[in-house]
Structure formats: C-alpha cells, structure tokens
Image (tube, rainbow, N blue to C red):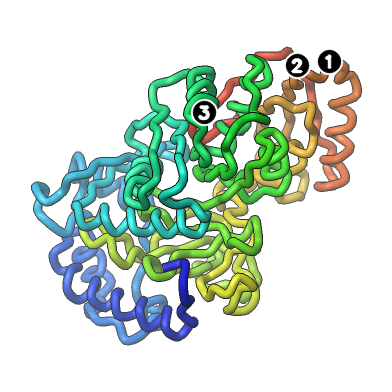
Amino acid sequence: MVDGKHPDRAAIQVGQLERLRTLVEKWVPSNRFYTRKFQAAGLIFEVASLADFSARFPFTTKQELVADQSAHPPYGTNLTFPLERYTRFHQTSGTTGTPLRWLDTPENWEWMVESWMNIFTAAEVGAHDKIYFAFSFGPFIGFWLAFDAGQKIGALCIPGGGLSSEARLKAIIENQPSVLCCTPTYALRLAEVAARENFPLEKSFVRKIVVAGEPGGSIPAIRDRLETLWPGAKVFDHHGMTETGPVTYECPAQPGVLHVLESAYFAEIVNPQTGTAVLPGEKGELVLTTLGRIGSPVFRYRTGDLVQAGEGARCVCGRNDLALRGGILGRVDDMFTVRGVNVHPSAVEDVLRRFQEIAEFQATVKVESSLAELSLAIEADAAFADSKDLARRIEKDLQMTFNLRIPVSIVAPGTLPRFEMKAKRWVRA
C-alpha cells in the first residue's frame, strides 16, 4: 500500500523476489509464449535473486508480442489459462505501431484495480469525492480501471463518455465533481472551450485533476498552465500501459516525481542501446516485470519510456518505492537530432506551454539526406488578438533552450486539430 507505514528497500525486494519466483516457477510452464521464449534462451525456471533475474532472463519487446499475435491471431500465446478464463479485452492505442490486444482474468483485473486504488489514495481521493471521467469508454484500459477503482474506494463516479466538450463542461458545473480524470491535453482543451463558451471554471468544484496518457502531467509549464486555467485545482500525475497496468503515482511531497508501485512491479532502468543497467541518476529506458498479472504477464518488458531515477533510496515523503525524477521524460524512439542537438518532444512542449497566448501547436520533423529539421506551427488563443511578435518570442526562447534556430509560424484560429486522448502533435514529413 502507498499509505500507512512504508516498507524499506529490503522488505520491498524480498516481496518482489517471492512473487517473481512464484510467477516463474508456478505459472510460466502454463504460458506458451514465455515457456517457448525461456526454453529458447536455455533457462532453468528458477530465480536465485533479483540480480540473477536481471542477468539471465531476456527482455520482452512490443515487436515480439505483435509478431506473436500476428502468428497466432487474434490474441497470441501470452495466455497462462484457457481462453474461457478471460473476461476483459483491451487494446493499445497504436500510436507507436500495430495495436496489441490484451486479455485479463477477473483475478488480473482485481490486481490492477487495487493498484489504481493506491493511486487514488496517494492523490488523497476518497469516498467523500465525486470523480468525473472525461473520456470515451473505448478499448483503452486506463480509465476503465480508474472507474472501477473509484467505485471501490466509495467515490461517486460520473462517466463522461459520448459527450461533446460543451456537454462535459455542463456536467462538471452541474454535478460539482471534486476530481477530474483525463489526459493533460484534454484538460487544456476543456479550459479552452470553457473560455469560448463562457463556462465559469472559477466556480468549478474541481480540486484535483488526475492525468495520464502523456508526459505532460509532470512537465512544469503544463502543470502551471492547468492549475491557472482550473482555479483551485492541483494536478496529480501517474502513468501506466495496457501491457502492464497502472505503474506509477505522483509523489505527494514532490510534484513532477513519480513513484513506481514496487509491490506490483519489478522495475529496472537500462541503457536503451546496450540494455545494461544505468548508473544511479542517469537517464534510461524503464523495464517492467508484472508481479501479479498472472494470466497475461510481461517479463523485463521494454516500455520505451525514458526515465531518470532519483538519488538515494528514501524519498522526502517517507516512501522507499523507486522515484522517477521529472516523471516520464519522453519516449526513447521519440528523440531526434537536429543539427547535432538531441531534442525530446516533452522539452519543446515545456517551452511552448510557458506562453499563455498559445492555444495549440503542431511540430513537423522533416528528414532529408539523413538530416532532421524541425519547424513549428502555432495557433494563438483568440483572447490574445495582438500576436504579431509571438513567433519571434517563441523562436528566441527555443534558441536559448536548445541553442537551435527553430522556425515558428502563426496559423489562423481553429486551424490545428484538438485531441481527447493522446495528442498527436508531432508529424514526420
């Protein structure tokens, strides 16, 4: 649990090893995908220690899982039980390749719901709250879990699926929820529509905006922008994946720092190129092993999320769960090099969100002769009529941040697309 007395590192690791051994020795032989994978690696299904597990067991990649589902449609062979044991279907967004289908047993689902309840506890959301879920209930796993967890903690859960942004704002004003769940992008969009339609967000009862799906919840400029647009509300970040379930929760004492739910996951941070563990404080790729999702587990799954571990075991909040400074810093495969400078989309967005005049933006990365060039299209908020020098000021800040000249153009209001779920602002030409 993330409340009450916090276990120390030794206790966390003892629990992880016990659950990992049970998973590998008891359940893997029933799972065709991992039995085949581990036998091909010449592994004995025993785990001497966490270090032994990291040293001997191979990574799992999304490409492997996609290939398995292609070869064994529709669900692949990463199923520990007969198909009739599974009651839940979900699917990845497909924003970084072919979507993955994922099945869960009732036991799997309860394990993930419990993790989400821990997230709500860390956010100080409880039975006294009303939670508004501003998203469509499609095959995306995250908010189904959040909705079930909200009910389990005793909160009044209000679904907002199938509604326009205007209708959702009306529901927020009329039902007076204290918590809003959505992506950072959509929280910005709701505020934009509220300004346009004269919805009084200053009269909203929302005190907490629980966000996920994008790195934005841990980006300081986006947090500040959201907390300005939603007066009286605080942003609370977390993240998860369809393949793993809910993974992190925001540190109650340090905004922008995410703690891994280490009772549910064994986490590693590795060099994306070499696959070896990074040194303390270095950036690397987050690798996860699910310790309780027995029906469809992942072992040493390369998430593609770029993170940086905090220094020291014990956090100022008293917790000993792995702390990720700055949250999810971006995607390993999102980084590109412009004239010798490494650029992450989240770093660009952090600069842009400091400008109150910006309603939306789109970035275009054009590659010619193996050289990448970046340009930005900016849509100004209608409230800021005089934006003559906006492009110049943005270019100046980008130059100071990246030591690069990045061309910026201003486009007409309403030109750029808006997003409810994961935003797709970066275009490769």
| Residue 234 shows in this picture | yes
Image quarter of residue 295: bottom left
Q: Residue at x 37, y 55 (%)?
A: 244
Q: Where does the image place residue 324, in percent across and percent down from the top left?
A: 58, 63
Dot 1 falls on a residue whose secondary structure is: loop
Comes first in the chain, label 3 or label 1: 3
Q: Quadrant of the N terminus?
A: bottom left
Q: Where does the image place residue 242, in percent across and percent down from the top left?
A: 37, 47
Q: Residue at x 57, y 50 (%)?
A: 236
Q: Residue at x 78, y 39 (%)?
A: 354
Residues at marks 3 and 1, CA–CA distance in whole angstroms: 29 Å
Q: Residue at x 58, y 62 (%)?
A: 251
> Badge 3 local density, few (<14 within 10 Å), some, or many (20+)?
many
From the image, tell me which residue sits under label 1: 385
Q: Where does the image place residue 340, in percent across and percent down from the top left?
A: 76, 49
Q: Quadrant of the C terminus?
A: top right
Callout 3 amino acid = Ile
Callout 2 amino acid = Ala
Tell me whether the residue at label 1 lies in contact with that at label 2, contact meaning CB atoms closer than 8 angstroms.
yes
